[in-house]
Amino acid sequence: MSILLSDAGLHKHLLPLTHTRPVGALRAGIHTIAGSWQRLTDLPVGFRTEAYLQAKFPEVGGGRLWEVHGGMLPTAAIAAAVLDLDPGEALVQGGRPLAFCSEGYSHTAEMDWTMAPAYFSQKEFSGQATLMERPWHLFQHCGAAIANDFAMLAEGRRSGPLSALNTVIGDAAKVFLEPGAKVEASILNTTNGPIWIGRDAEVMEGCMIRGPFALGDHSQLKMGAKIYGASSFGPECRVGGEVNNSVILGYSNKGHDGFLGNSVLGEWCNLGADTNTSNLKNTYGEVKAWSYAAEAFAPTGQQFLGLVMGDHAKSGINTMFNTGTVAGVCANVFGSGFPDKHIPAFSWGGGATYALDKALDTCRVVMQRRSVPLDAADRKILAEVFRLTESYRT
């Protein structure tokens, strides 16, 4: 028995974040989507994704298989409804599929995630189903994801001790410290949601945090950081300055002053000192952003949208990102003025190409600093992203 998280036709809609991972490997709360499914079900979790990602993110099979919409926020109620499916049944809401159950590999083709096939009997799900289908959905649903994960992870456990030098506003029971976590001389406000501090993570002196908030294992909030929830930073992040309602998937640095708002950063990103993002147009109008699915700038329906940045992208000091900027994988952004709102993958400065071998060498050095190797699977994925995005650099 196993869970298979499908990209559900969303790969292009969630680029550049999904250039280097399946939809189900994205993070909105404390865990990745896959991590939450594994903890909720105690079953192996695999991925149905793009062929070039499959070596690093393999499928699972054998026995009973529940194929689930990879962008669906996992909850206890949804997990129970999915596991209640028998082979040949589909979980739907308003006619739209949320999950399918099959035996082994009896259905190997990509499912239609707009309408359940006629050969599946349908079971209606009447609860709340939250689908993350665009990059900004990660920060919009961040608060709900943190609350779900917090309830699951804190149940039956006792938080690590919180130093008396801290000030807690709201319910202190909504602050949870994993083993080795350190928080000193900071203000923690749980009025709007819980605060989770991961294993061996550190909140330095003078930080101000409003929940919902999650700080991943071995991450750091630098002195005097101002964090507005809902925000989630994955493992091994270094974050300072001012952050509002943003998600950092992990292993990335925003270590200096500067504003990051209504944004999503991938892994292994680095924002130079005093990098700032605009998250609201001067006209207060709807933000347009680059869509890889539409191959054009498209309306987002959002008034607040800052920066969406793919893995391994970097910005130089004093970089100013315009509202709704999309920066691709391994983009190296520097220079005066506002950069373009669509910065292609493997861009170098204002228009040159970041040579693949040089980019890979930088990736290796950066990852080595966190004791993570750049393995053959990573290299193949980045080489394929370089190939797939070549037309944007011309």
Image (tube, rainbow, N blue to C red):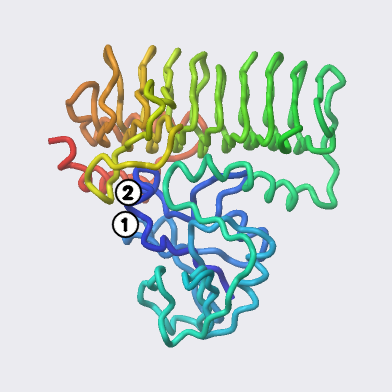
Image side of residue 288 versus residue 95, left or right = left
Q: Nearer the viewer, residue 270 or 187?
A: 187
Q: Quadrant of the N terminus?
A: bottom right
Q: Residue at x 38, y 59 (%)?
A: 55
Image side of residue 233 versus residue 117, left or right = right
In the image, residue 352 above or below residue 125:
above
Callout 1–callout 2 Cβ contact below 8 Å: yes
Q: Residue at x 43, y 87 (%)?
A: 119
Image spot of residue 242 (x, y percent): 56, 19
Question: In whole angstroms, how far apart are the C-alphas of marks 1 and 2?
Answer: 6 Å
Q: Nearer the viewer, residue 352 or 373?
A: 352
- Which amino acid, mark 1? Tyr
Q: Within 10 angstroms of label 2, few (less than 14), some, or many (20 or more) residues?
A: some
Q: Quadrant of the C terminus?
A: top left
Q: Give the image quarter of residue 333.
A: top left
Residue that label 2 marks: 381
Residue that label 1 marks: 52
Outermost left residue = 394
Q: Give the image quarter of residue 239.
A: top right
Sequence-first tag of 1 and 2 = 1
Q: Within 10 angstroms of label 1, few (less than 14), some, or many (20 or more) residues?
A: some
Q: How many marks?
A: 2
In the image, residue 9 above or below residue 282:
below
Q: Nearer the viewer, residue 200 or 283?
A: 283
Image spot of residue 232 (x, y percent): 59, 36
Q: Which mark is residue 83?
A: none
- Which amino acid, mark 2? Ile
Q: Give the image quarter of residue 289.
A: top left
Outermost bottom residue = 119
Q: Residue at x 18, y 39 (%)?
A: 392
Q: Residue at x 45, y 40 (%)?
A: 373
Image spot of residue 252 (x, y percent): 49, 30
